[in-house]
Image: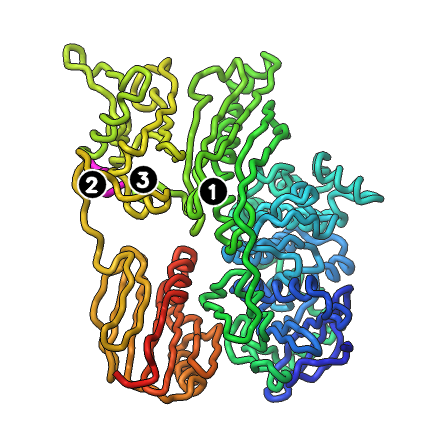
Amino acid sequence: MNDTWNVPGYAEVDVLGTGGFGRVVLAKHEATGKMAAIKYLRADFLADARIVAGFRQEAWLLSGVRSPHVVRLFDFVETPQGAALVMEAVPGVSLRALLVAENVLAPEAALAILKGSLLGLADAHAAGVVHRDYKPGNVLVSREGESKLVDFGLATLDGHNGLTAGSPAYMAPEQWAGQPGRPATDVYAATCVFYQCVTGHRPFEADTSEQLRALHGTAAVPLEAVPEPLRPLIARGMAKDPAWRPATADAFVTELEAVARETYGKNWEKRGWKRLATSAAALTALTPLALLTAAGTAAAPVAAAGAGAGVTAGVSGTGVTAAMVGKIAAAVAIAGGLVAGGLVILRSGEDPPPPPAALSVAVQTLSGRDPALPISYELQYPQVSGGADAAVRQRVNDALRAPIDKRLKSVRDGVAVPSTLEQIRQAGETAAMRSSARVLLQKPGLLSVHYEHDLDSDVLGHATWRFPEALSVDLTTGQVLGPQDVFRPEILTVAGMRTLTQRLAPHTRNGFCTVPTVVGDTERQVTMDAADRPGGGDHVPAATFGFTAAGAEFDILWYELGCATAAGNETVVLPYDELDDLLQPKFRTMLGRTAPAASSAPPSTSEKPGAGTTYTNARFGFTTQVPPGYTASSWVPENGEGMRFTRDDLGATLTVWGTNSGGRRPADELARLVASTEGDGGRVTFRTADSEGYAVSGYLGDGRIFYEHTSIGAGSTAGLRWVYPADRKTELDGPVTDTVKAFTPGDLSRPH
């Protein structure tokens, strides 16, 4: 192993930079003359499985981020001789070099750079990726007036790695503490860089890392050097508690643009880039990237031909499409399964992935004091770790933390009311918030949690500041389960809510109260129907609810139903023998419960055709799993037959078929399909073929994701194809994966 290995098909032009783990070079593709930036891993590290896995992870993460504000990944190449990322070459300079030359940037220029890179972070966050190492060296400023993010080497999807890693000058307090990386963590780092741009120095500087950690953790942001109009923006972005920062980079862009327009006028961005253009062009002219004007950048991925024995050559498409031997395929499959709409399938002979760590739950505590208001807080919330799907795990953790984030905001808003704030200050008190959290039930696909919120304050002494709440999360999707996911449709009606009220009443302390109406009229009894509350609503339970091993806990806030405020709240448990027949069959399965016994509940409606079934074709013998809620219809291909399953509310279609067209070469069929897709304006992001068939995925010309898996035998063929909107990817990843795993092609050795 040595550092002279080059990606086959590329000629090195010049070195763009070197670092502890490798080098980045400008290279020309010999067949087309297009330029690309290639990041090589140092040969010393090829034997270090941990470092190589991290390099693969960077490739996989970059492949899932599609943004004009993030440097594109064209190919990942790994052979026994070396490993490299082939990336877009951008004619520009790093923000670090720009700051060395300029020291301080005009506010409009700094805001323009921040906006572009924040948009890149926003697109990464939308793909479930947290960068964790935003710094001037990782922001490229082009001559054309745009900024792009680079280097996702520390990025993570899981939001729970426990690793204190990053660039210390820009690390958020939670990152110093080894807590999960969140979008708000990137917002903090970006704000630190923005501070440096407008002041000429970093917000905190120290001689030791411990001193720097203390400053980021407890010291007030030194805003005196910041232009007055920008101080609130920086104070928000660098709040010690991530709950006080903009929750996402996208939200921060909205705030940034509002401040910029109000302070610098509607043309602020154009003026900002105009100020940067001369410096960026002059600095770029001094680097090898000046060659890009003549040679052109790589406008599309280029195959790495002849990469080495046992390695599949790369193919066209944006994303990771080049040589991936057994272990890289395993690493990608472990990392997430669906990559930019493509499903990675391990073929025979490849190393099987180790099983993912089991999902576990631990209760975390967020504590501190508000920097501006007399509020202290000690708030518990559950957090999950382990599991196979990092993006789902992040969604679960976001859902589990949401109640305390909402609680923080509500108390802060209440205390910030001028009259209330004055009373609290006159009383010399600090409103002390507390929230406790306990796990009610954990099943393989379900987590149910109960929160108890409390507040110590003489001024805010009203009972409504103290209440319980519960939520349940689908651990396979990260979705918070609402009434429509839990109860049968006929229960979410006037009659159904009346049934629920009748069953809950005997378990309450004093039954459901009555409230007076017009003088002389009969008093009205409150119910569990949210539509009966003051203000109305849908026919759903007017309480949050969670699930235990014994039954469901309903957290009833009597004052919200119309009872006297003094009635307070009550947690009422409804046993499963009185609840089972009200629940959706799918949800009963999540609870691990069997079909209910007969009861007085309204009759159930029938499932949609094809819902939650296994379909087997009698003629060709292929079999597939059909997700719940899909409607079946006949689909007849040439010289064969099949079935199409659709779900209109998701815009998703699953098609399965068999044909008497065996004996073909899978690689030839795959090439024809790729050419047809790209000829229609689509884009292939993954493809693979062997002697038994092929798999391919990507985007159609209209932007929808497609995935096709076809098995080809000597006498016949069987296939499966999914098509669905890109914005439904998150909720369809699981069903797509399940159907692919369950698909069996039948006997392909003969015609049918």
Can residue 260 be seen here?
A: no
Question: Answer yes or no: do the residues labelled 2 and 1 have beta carbons within 8 Å?
Answer: no
* Place of residue 232 in the rendered image (x, y in percent of width and height, measured from the top left): 61, 38
**What is the crowding at mark 2: few (fewer than 14 residues within 10 Å), some, or many (at least 20)?**
some
The residue where tag 2 is placed is 490
Q: Is 614 or 386 nearer to us in this picture?
A: 614
Q: Is 699 or 596 nearer to us in this picture?
A: 596
The alpha-carbon separation of the residues under discs 1 and 3 comes to 16 Å
Q: How many marks?
A: 3
| Residue lying furthest right | 207
In magenta, the rendered stretch is: 487-493
Determine whether 430 is above or below 136 in the image.
above
Horizontal arrangement in the rendering, residue 250 relative to residue 616 (left or right): right
User: Residue type at mark 2?
Assistant: Glu
The residue where tag 1 is placed is 399
* Place of residue 238 in the rendered image (x, y in percent of width and height, measured from the top left): 64, 41
Q: Is 532 or 188 nearer to us in this picture?
A: 532
Taking the spot 62% from the left edge, 63% from the top edge, the residue there is: 58
Taking the spot 70% from the left edge, 81% from the top edge, the residue there is: 6
Under tag 1, what secondary structure? helix
Tell me which numbered mark, 1 or 3, is placed earlier along the sequence. 1
**What is the crowding at mark 3: few (fewer than 14 residues within 10 Å), some, or many (at least 20)?**
some
Under tag 3, what secondary structure? helix
The residue where tag 3 is placed is 483
Residue 576 location, quadrant: top left
Q: Is 261 or 94 nearer to us in this picture?
A: 94
| Residue lying furthest top | 520
The alpha-carbon separation of the residues under discs 3 and 2 comes to 12 Å
User: Residue type at mark 3?
Assistant: Pro
Tell me which numbered mark, 3 or 2, is placed earlier along the sequence. 3
Taking the spot 61% from the left edge, 29% from the top edge, the residue there is: 370
